[in-house]
Image (cartoon, grey):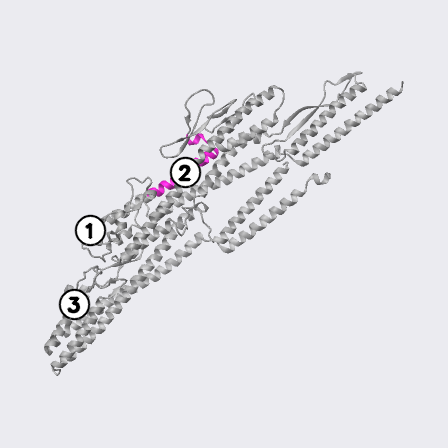
Amino acid sequence: MADLLSILSQAGQSLNAHRGAAAVAAANVQNANTPGYARQRANLTTQSPASLENGYFIGRGVELSSVVQIRDRFVEGQLPRALGAQARSSTEAEALKAIQVLNPDQSSGLTVALADFYGAIRALSVNAGDTVLRQNFLDSANHLVATFQRSSVVLGDSLTGLNDRLPAIADQANALSQGIAQLNREIEEARGAGAEPNHLLDLRQRYQDELSQLTGATPLIDSKGSVSMLLPGGSPLVSGHHAASISTVLQADGDYAIQVGKTTGAGAATLLPKDALGGTILGILDAREGIRAASDQLDSFVFDFANAINAVNRAGFDRNGAPGGDVFAVGVTPGGSAASIRLDAAVAADPDLLAGASTAAGAPGNGDHFLVLLATEREPLASGQDPVRTLAGIVGAFGARTANATAAAAHDSALLEGLQEMRESASGVSIDDELIEMSKAQRAFDAVSMVIKVTEGMLDTLLKLK
Amino acid sequence: MRVTDRLLFESASRYAGIAREKMDSAQREVHTGLRVRHPGDDPTAAGLIVAGRSNVERLQSLSQTMGRVSDELLVADTALAGVTTSLMRIQQLATSLGNETNGPEALQAGALEVDALRQNILSLLNTQSSGRYIFGGNQDAAPPFDPSGAYLGDAGVRQVEIAPGIYQTFSVRMDEAIAGAGGAVDVMATIQDLIAALQAGDNAAVRSTLDDLQRSITQVAGARTRIGASMSIIEAAMNVGGMLEDGAVEGLARLTDADQFESMSKLVLAQRALDAALTASASSFRLTIIDKLR
């Protein structure tokens, strides 16, 4: 029976409910700038059962039935892949754009060094006996060698820098995986106690996002609400309360490969192919592949070029009439040629050993063979193209890869920004909304207070009847 | 769409960032004047720039080399002009002193003058340019004519690349033009014969050198003609090369260089976009219910 005392009691509970609603709105306002925070909503429901009086159900006030997070599952479902894709393409694009050594119009770059080299041969071809011009040729050859080496060192340093990032990223990813597994346990326990642990859900979501960015892993939620994180190849990083470790393995070529252990039980870690990964890690592997391709092409070019020059020089005769030797010292295979190329020690010490003559007559002014050497400027190397076109091909291919990565990064970033805006729109805190919610709660609180006051008045009236 | 405060701030930050990035890019384009800095800016253009830059450098190198050859040819022509002048004077003396009216004393005096002219010719034939003896063929490290007038050089001729893959012979074979190879007259020997005839006071012997002296003058003139022809070809090639270089530089500039007007327009537009983004952000930040509730 809804007597006056029970109205007072219900009003007290209702005050608590509205205070709770105001507290939720206040918490939202205070977390408006907290990364990963999803706004919460206080759900108020009529207290039941309503009391039956004279055949009528009379309501019994309001209660705070739950405090829930607002998340758009449709948007949240798309975000992990978008985070991984954007991290991947941006990482690759930034790494490739940082390589300046293949810039096409550098005054001190490969193009100019190569042109200077042939310019020195051209000058020698009309004055083969000139010792100053012979020395100039050696200087330009030395400059070309130094430019090859510098380019190789820069590309190599970039590869090393990218490789060095991988162990740190693996550590970061492992910490996140363990964090998610731990949070899965805590969330399960909290839910078991009957409460929705929104603060833990926020933290787990943050970890999930970061793990998706680093590894491209996507979440899978089980019936208990635990999140498993799976790499693009299907390997689990997190499964329920257990996390697997990823680690780096140094390969024969000096690159790190990524391997993943098991989430439960013992067993050897599995080496992951590139397409089983995603996110920043895959971006690094992609960038590494692009830089490695440019580096390998440069090595092949240097190897072919040096051997072509050496072959021509060996076919001629030096200033003393002796058969020519090598101009450049390179290895027996293209690998590492750009870094290891040197000017042949004998030629470097004696410019007269440059084979400018076509006969063994020992004629100092005979520069016929320098014209043959000069012709290598237009003759195809083993790559099928002349030196300049080969170099242009290397620069163009590297540029195309960079441009593709940049375009992909722009596309992925736009896609991610759109999704993040949608997430923010759904889950973000609007100060205006929350202040209105607080005002609404305050108004209801005031009204319920008035109910108490009126009920007290009614009780006073009854007491005065005595 | 529900717009939250954070969305507002993040959008403002992002749009301002985009505007700043565009401004930075336009600013860099204005400062450097370059449209393509990194191969990724325009991969096709990047490859073409490498080929274009290389072509410009090659044409400049061709031009410099031809310039050096042209200078050498000028030196050679000047030297051979001197040789011709001396030979003509010798011819004059031989014609005059071959006349029986000249006595031994006149012939002796003539011998002295011819010998002096001979020395002058030898000196001219041992002319150097850029440290090399230009009339020695491939034996250009030492004087090609010894004091006796014997030719120590060889029959080597040199070529210069006048366009990529196209060569032009530019040196003259002194074994033919002076030393008598291939049925030609040995100029120095003829002069030596004349000196001997003059010293012997033999008018008839002096006269007998006249034909060879004439042929000597013709031979040297022929050599000069060949030098002149080479100079003309090289000059024409340099002119063509200059035009090609201008075209190549222009083509390269089209690929690499930013249009300054376009760059400045981009910069001004980017500045305005940034200004607008900041103004819009600032005004949207002011519109909040907090102010209305105070």
- Which image quarter: residue A184? top right
Q: Magenta span covers which residues?
A: A273-300
* Secondary structure category for the residue under label 1: loop
**Chain designation of label 2:** A
**Where is the N terminus of chain A found, in terms of image quarters?**
top right
Evaluate whether label 1 is on the same chain as label 3: no
* Secondary structure category for the residue under label 3: loop
Q: Nearer the viewer, residue B273 or A447?
A: A447
* Secondary structure category for the residue under label 2: helix
Q: Magenta segment: does it hold A147? A: no
Image: A387 above or below B109: above
Q: The residue under label 1 is which amino acid type? A: Ala
Residue A452 spot, x, y in % from top left:
79, 25
Residue most toward the bottom? B101
Which residue is identified by label 3?
A: B149
Label disc, if present, on residue A160 of the rendered structure? 2
Q: Do the residues labelled 1 and 2 touch (CB within 8 Å)?
A: no
Q: Nearer the viewer, residue A368 or A141?
A: A141
Q: Main secondary structure of the magenta part?
A: helix
Q: Distance between the residues labelled 2 and 3?
A: 69 Å
Image position of A113 (left or right of A422): left
Image: A144 above or below A3: below
- Which image quarter: residue B101? bottom left
